[in-house]
């Protein structure tokens, strides 16, 4: 059974060469490139597979969501669902007595712009496959779900309303959860900024980058989690910066898990 998901890219140019590694590795994932910013991600399930059952749609949702998250993380880009995330206010104009009623959908072009579109590389997809393998065993899929909420919020708008603040919060919550629960094994951080920066340091992040996380923390403290001062708009770029730190943390953390699993398998 073949199931596909149409994915759009706001950050990268894509081509068939980006996904050539899937064929070489014999992956269950296939890709059909539609144009330089849209592609179909395809998952084939044979009739003798354990996933070929009444829960197939549920399995598809988990598989596609996990792979979509993995591509976003390893590419440091913005890939989202092509269909089903656009929303807009619907009004009825006219009173149906003196003039015919007409349904009007208000829409605006909110296509987010990166300063420069990068090429999606084979290495991005190779790393995404590794990350997919490390993310898939997550039993409750909390990380992937919260992360993809951020992707959805970053990708959609409601006419003149954007969701950048919500996206920033989603990505920060993932960072906070991974550092607190997975890396430090704590229930609560005592000095949040210092401890999160140290977690990045322990994972091998660049010291200059670590120091820049303070700006994310300040924005989080003043505008995202609290509203005691005058609310200021959260820009697309600020939400993307929070996503970038989240991507780096997830990539480094789950890559270590994947490498540990590989070593254990080779030593067995």
Image: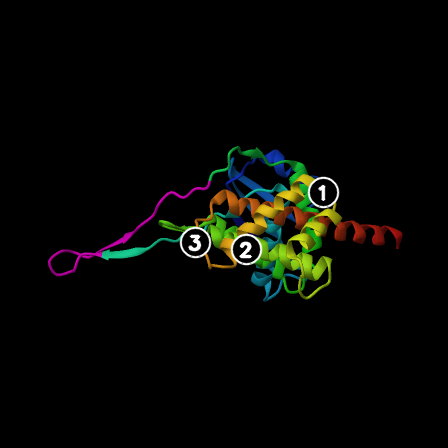
Judging by the rendered image, the residue that carries numbered circle 2 is: 221
> For the residues marked 1 and 2, what is the alpha-carbon distance in whole angstroms?
45 Å
Q: Nearer the viewer, residue 39 or 206?
A: 206
The image position of residue 37, as x and y in percent, is 51, 38
Label 2 neighbour load within 10 Å: few <14, some 14-19, many 20+: few
The first of marks 1 and 2 along the sequence is: 1
Judging by the rendered image, the residue that carries numbered circle 3 is: 231
| Callout 2–callout 3 Cβ contact below 8 Å | no
Element at label 3: loop
Mark in the foreground, 3 or 1: 3
Q: Which mark is residue 148?
A: none
Q: Quadrant of the C terminus?
A: bottom right
Mark in the foreground, 1 or 2: 2
Magenta range is: 93-112
> For the residues marked 2 and 3, what is the alpha-carbon distance in whole angstroms?
12 Å
Q: Nearer the viewer, residue 154 or 241?
A: 241
> Does residue 102 appear to the left or right of 221 in the view shown?
left
Q: Which mark is residue 25?
A: 1
Residue 232, relative to residue 35: is it above or below? below
Q: Could one spot residue 99 in this view of the protein?
A: yes
Q: Could one spot residue 60 in this view of the protein?
A: no
Prevailing secondary structure of the magenta residues = loop
The image position of residue 235, as x and y in percent, is 47, 45
The first of marks 2 and 3 along the sequence is: 2
């Amino acid at each position: 059974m073949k199931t596909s998901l149409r994915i759009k890219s706001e950050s990268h140019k894509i081509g068939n060469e980006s996904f050539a590694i899937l064929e070489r590795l014999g992956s269950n994932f296939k890709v059909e490139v539609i144009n330089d910013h849209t592609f179909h991600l395809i998952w084939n399930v044979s009739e003798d597979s354990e996933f070929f059952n009444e829960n197939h749609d549920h399995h598809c949702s988990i598989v596609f969501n996990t792979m979509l998250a993995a591509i976003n993380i390893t590419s440091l880009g913005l890939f989202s669902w092509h269909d089903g995330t656009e929303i807009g206010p619907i009004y009825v104009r006219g009173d149906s007595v003196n003039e015919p009623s007409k349904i009007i959908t208000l829409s605006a072009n909110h296509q987010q712009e990166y300063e420069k579109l990068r090429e999606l590389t084979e290495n991005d997809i190779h790393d995404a496959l590794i990350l997919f393998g490390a993310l898939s065993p997550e039993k409750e899929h909390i990380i992937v779900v919260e992360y993809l909420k951020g992707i959805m919020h970053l990708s959609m708008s409601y006419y003149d309303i954007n969701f950048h603040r919500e996206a920033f919060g989603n990505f920060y919550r993932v960072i906070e959860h991974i550092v607190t629960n997975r890396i430090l094994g704590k229930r609560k951080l005592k000095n949040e900024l210092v401890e999160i920066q140290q977690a990045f340091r322990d994972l091998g992040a660049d010291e200059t980058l670590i120091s820049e996380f303070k700006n994310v923390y300040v924005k989080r403290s003043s505008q995202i989690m609290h509203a005691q001062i005058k609310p200021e708009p959260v820009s697309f770029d600020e939400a993307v910066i929070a996503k970038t730190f989240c991507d780096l943390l997830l990539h480094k953390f789950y890559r270590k898990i994947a490498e540990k699993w590989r070593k254990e398998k080779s030593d067995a």
